[in-house]
Image (cartoon, helix red, strand yellow):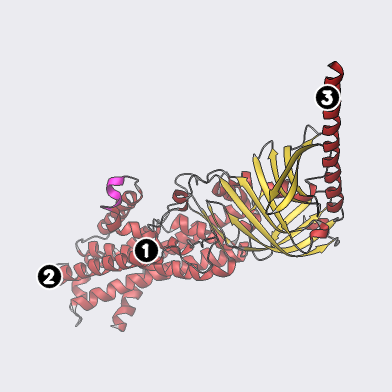
Amino acid sequence: MWQLLKIELFKIFRKPRTFISFGAIAAIILIIQLGLKFDGKSYVELMMGDISDSFEIPYAMVLNGYFVAFVILNAILIHVPLLVALVAGDSIAGEANMGTLRLVMTKPVSRTGLMLVKYFASVIYTVLLLLWMALLALLLSIFFFGTNDTIIPRNDVIEQIQKADTLWRYIAAFAFASVALSTVAALAFLLSVFAENSIGPIVATMSIVIVLTILSELKIPMYDNTVKPYLFTSHMLGWKGFFYSRIGPDHMVIPGSIENLPAILRSLGILLGYIVMFVTTAILVFRKKDILS
Amino acid sequence: MIKQISAVFIFSLFTFMSFAQEASSLVQKARAKIEQVNSYEADGTMKTNVNFLKVPEAKVKIYFKKPDKLKIKNENGISLVPKSILGIGLNNLLTGNFTVLDAGSDILNNIKVKIVKLIPVDENSPVVLSTAYIDPVHLVILKAKITTKENGTYEIEMSYGKYVDYALPDKITCTFNIKDYKLPKGVTLDYDDGSKKISDQKLQDTKGRVEIFYASYAVNKNIPDTVF
């Protein structure tokens, strides 16, 4: 199995387009960092809204590496599914398109084993992409902007997290994001089983993610309790939950606390459930599939 | 009859003038006490209670230097300090030229206080009217209501301890008006974790409160201007 996994990873990283994702992420992160380095105050002013009328805001301190990293993740994590779909959607359909799938199946490997290895390889790619993002968004931002307390602007509340209380939240958020993106990888992987060309599953995955994300964010009461709780896209933003703190009776933030950990764990469970469902369906379909290419 | 009316009028006038003089004298004494302090550096903790802010308790250093420099610094992080505290510090509440009006007496936290209204003489003053509740025994302000031209009305309450001789409080509570905070639409997507939103619970709360607990003061210490 290990040998098979190494072969699958070799196949993924042999393709130049795999590195488009890493290049795209590096480019967008550097562009955001550059913009904030030279005109970060305007951005912070926008984020803080009217409260600068009532409060003295130390803009230079707010604009620190942790804040910049959050801005970057907030801006790009919603688009990363496209980059994940590029690889996961190609895993079966790409081989079918090149005509190598039948050749692979002549090897003494079970179809289930092959599918699990292929999915696992996609997950490794996803995790590496996130590690790359963490390296650039977090470490590079800390290098350029230093560290301080993190100010998290939400729709109607501003959260402040103490500097010493921040790093573990990022680690937890990246771990959660890797599960969320692995769900997208599982969806692309499932769709890949039905196609003979990788474009189809990639575009289909993106279309599904876009439609469901819009549905998740729509403020239509009819969908709030009926549809939204069951969409995986509603739970993909769960990584942000690690940056929301609980407050005590005196309205002070409790350091090290999470506003609603059970909700995050529920979201995590739902995402893992989707992964199991997508991968299992993909395996079942693939096991009965006539491989003609 | 005219003589009697004149006598009552003159008596009333003298009574009023004597009260005004008494109030003015009290303000002068309180001011003299405050003016002993040319500068200070204090350690303390700050608690902010504003419906749209979720911030931790902050360890702060407070710097003051005459005539009106005040800085609150969080040595370990960020503190969002209400402008009302910084704009019109307590130390310059009784400075400047103003007309003093006696507004009677009251009991505040079991302490008999004298109420005085201060109307700035300077038309360009940011303050329209201040009402100070002065403890005539210790010659310190226990409470002040300040109406400003731009930032509405806010209230400051103070309690004193071992630095009462310098008119420096152990605790200040500042209550001020706040506006709602709303992030521009589309800037971020919130994770809806199902928690009851603070704004739902305290939507009607248009007042914010900041409490500063002073642990220690270094009075009349040389503080460089660069601190401010």
Q: Could you say which is closer to the camera, residue A196 or residue B19?
A: B19
Which chain is mark 1 on?
A: A
From which residue to which does the magenta span run? A220-227
Find numbered disc 3 in the image and state the secondary structure of the residue it sits on.
helix
Question: Are discs 1 and 3 located on one and the same chain?
Answer: no
Residue topped by disc 1: A263
What is the CA distance from the residue labelled 2 to the residue labelled 1? Answer: 38 Å
Task: Left or right? Give the position of B15 relative to A77.
Answer: right
Which chain is mark 2 on?
A: A
**What amino acid type should be assigned to the residue bearing mark 2?**
Lys
Mark 1: give few (<14), some (14-19) or many (20+) Cα within 10 Å. Answer: some
Seen at 62% across and 50% down, the residue is A41
**Residue A191, percent from left and from top:** 23, 61
Residue topped by disc 2: A288
Find numbered disc 2 in the image and state the secondary structure of the residue it sits on.
loop
**What amino acid type should be assigned to the residue bearing mark 3?**
Phe
* Label whose residue precedes the other's in the sequence (2 or 1): 1
Quadrant, the N terminus of chain A: bottom left
Q: Is residue B80 visible?
A: no
**Residue A140, percent from left and from top:** 56, 65
Task: Left or right? Give the position of B58 relative to A20.
Answer: right
Q: Could you say which is closer to the camera, residue A80 or residue B83?
A: B83
What is the CA distance from the residue labelled 2 to the residue labelled 3? Answer: 110 Å
Residue topped by disc 3: B9
Q: Could you say which is closer to the camera, residue A234 or residue B134?
A: B134
Seen at 45% across and 44% down, the residue is B185
Residue B22 is inside the magenta segment = no
Task: Left or right? Give the position of B197 relative to B11.
Answer: left
Name the mark nearer the viewer: 1 or 3: 3
**What amino acid type should be assigned to the residue bearing mark 1?**
Ala
